[in-house]
């Protein structure tokens, strides 16, 4: 006799051959569990796999049936035990919406030098300019995930991915013609940071920075149609373009600097840039940049440092006098002169690291001196404590001094650890090199890391590197 009864929502009981089959179906219809109860008589279980599937079908379980569980029931006689017998598939979620940028993410940093030694400033691409209305990004709609199914065969639609807003930043807006496109709301320089696109308006000065303009401090990018006169300061959080010469002025950029003229100083002015500097020549100047320096002429009696590399190219690629250094590479035609002018060229050397190392050394000395002073103070107060002459304020001071004394070794140990790590960085100059395409004259001092070598004779077409213990020279053929 076959009998099916409804016990509770989601549960069904089927009686067949005196065996009881309880099928529990989850509320979301993604799971079904089966419990088989033996009759009171000692009857044998004579159901085949197909018969069990048929029983499940009668209870509404038609999809996702776990045949391995059915085999276990038949083979092992698993009765009176609640077992998962079917499982549906929940729908998957599609990809979230995204966006594609409609401008180059990377900017060019390698200017083209013509045969006359002049840089082609028209195609540098360092500043990504945008015109009002220019498309900047296009939204990629979300996708729909794979559909699922319930154990009774109903398809569950796939879930759409989450919507993400366009990366709208300053001076941008959603296009009135297409809600999936972000456009520039004004002319300016494109900035792309933390998945936000903004347009910085470029502040343009038509002539010189001089008494008529005063000092300049701007949050975006600057274009200076003239030069910068001595004694003035120009600061910008973005890039700076300068059409003519920089005199003994202070120029600081949070991006890159393109100086189509040169830097003619007297030793008090300086140029600093977080990224790159491209300039025609440098004379009596102080320069420090975070990445690369490109000079299309000569560097005379100047202090110059680049966080990565310095390239001198063109008809007068000469380093003469002063100190020129980069962490990885200096490349030029000529160093020094036939007169043996003292000229220092360094690689594998970072002034900021040296400064930090010296600061750590001084801090370590200070803490050790504090240690000695605290030791003496504790000794004096402890004597008073032994003689029962310690007042309340002195007792508090003694407790504080002991706490500081106990903490000082940890501070000194941490500074020593930082010093060791920094010292290792300072001496990690295995890839640093100085490339001379022409002549390095006698009187030139080559420094790689902490290693120094003064040239006592002229050498040509060579590369200076370090083998760890000494500076070696490789000749070009």
Image (spheres, rainbow, N blue to C red):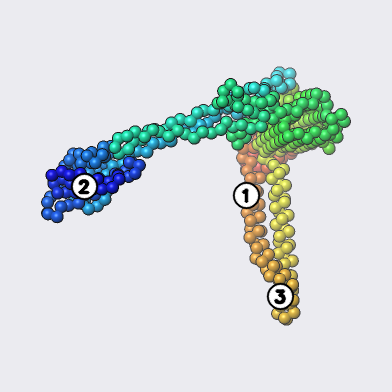
Q: Which residue is mark 3?
A: 382
Give the CA separation, mark 3 to mark 1: 39 Å
Crowd band around label 3 with a 10 angstrom C-alpha radius: few (<14), some (14–19), many (20+): some
* Secondary element at tag 1: helix
Question: At 72% across and 81% down in the image, what residue appears?
Answer: 388
| Residue 116 sits above or below residue 50 on the image | above
Where is mark 1, residue-wise?
421
Residue 284 located left or right of residue 36: right
Tell me the residue at 69%/67% (across/down).
Answer: 400
Residue at 45% from the left image edge and 30% from the top image edge:
143
> Which residue is more in the foreground, 72 or 144?
144
Q: Residue at x 61, y 33 (%)?
A: 196
Which numbered mark, 2 or 3, is in the foreground of this view? 2
The residue indicated by pointer 2 is 21
Dot 3 or dot 1: first in sequence order is 3
Residue 21, x across and y down, in percent:
21, 47
| Residue 391 makes an appearance in the image | yes
Q: Is residue 310 visible?
A: no
Sequence-wise, the earlier of marks 2 and 3 is 2
SS type, badge 2: strand
Q: Tell which tag, 3 or 1, sits nearer the viewer.
A: 3
Q: Nearest the camera: 189 or 384?
A: 189
């Amino acid at each position: 006799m076959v009998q099916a009864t409804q016990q509770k929502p989601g549960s069904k009981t089927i009686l067949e051959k005196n065996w009881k089959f309880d099928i529990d179906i989850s509320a979301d219809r993604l799971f079904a569990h089966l419990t088989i109860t033996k009759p009171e008589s000692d009857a044998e279980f004579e159901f085949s796999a197909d018969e069990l599937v048929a029983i499940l079908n009668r209870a509404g379980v038609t999809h996702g049936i776990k045949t391995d569980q059915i085999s276990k029931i038949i083979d092992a006689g698993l009765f009176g035990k609640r077992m998962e017998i079917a499982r549906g598939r929940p729908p998957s979620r599609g990809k979230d919406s995204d966006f594609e940028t409609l401008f180059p993410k990377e900017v060019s940093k390698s200017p083209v030098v013509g045969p006359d030694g002049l840089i082609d400033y028209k195609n540098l691409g360092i500043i990504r300019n945008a015109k009002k209305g220019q498309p900047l990004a296009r939204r990629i709609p979300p996708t729909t995930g794979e559909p699922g199914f319930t154990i009774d065969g109903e398809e569950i639609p796939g879930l759409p991915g989450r919507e993400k807003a366009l990366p709208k930043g300053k001076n941008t807006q959603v296009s009135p013609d297409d809600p999936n496109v972000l456009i520039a709301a004004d002319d300016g320089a494109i900035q792309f940071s933390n998945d936000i696109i903004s347009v910085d308006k470029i502040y343009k000065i038509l002539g010189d920075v001089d008494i008529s303009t005063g000092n300049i401090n701007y949050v975006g990018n600057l274009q200076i149609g003239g030069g910068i006169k001595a004694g003035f300061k120009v600061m910008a959080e973005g890039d700076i373009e300068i059409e003519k010469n920089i005199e003994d002025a202070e120029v600081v950029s949070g991006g890159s600097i393109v100086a189509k003229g040169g830097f003619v100083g007297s030793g008090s002015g300086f140029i600093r840039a977080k990224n790159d500097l491209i300039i025609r020549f440098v004379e009596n100047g102080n320069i420090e940049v975070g990445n690369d320096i490109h000079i299309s002429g000569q560097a005379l009696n100047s202090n110059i440092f680049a966080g990565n590399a310095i390239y001198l190219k063109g008809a007068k690629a000469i380093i003469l006098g002063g100190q020129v250094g980069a962490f990885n590479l200096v490349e030029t035609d000529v160093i020094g002169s036939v007169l043996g002018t003292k000229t220092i060229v360094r690689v594998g050397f970072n002034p900021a690291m040296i400064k930090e190392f010296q600061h750590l050394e001084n801090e370590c000395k200070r803490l050790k001196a504090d240690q000695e002073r605290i030791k003496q103070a504790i000794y004096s107060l402890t004597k008073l404590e032994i003689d029962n002459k310690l007042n309340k304020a002195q007792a508090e001071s003694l407790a504080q001094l002991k706490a500081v004394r106990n903490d000082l070794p940890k501070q000194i140990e941490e500074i020593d650890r930082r010093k060791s790590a920094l010292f290792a960085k300072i001496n990690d100059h295995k890839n640093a090199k100085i490339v001379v395409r022409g002549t390095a004259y006698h009187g030139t001092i080559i420094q790689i890391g902490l290693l120094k070598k003064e040239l006592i004779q002229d050498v040509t077409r060579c590369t200076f590197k370090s083998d760890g213990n000494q500076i070696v020279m490789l000749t070009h053929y």
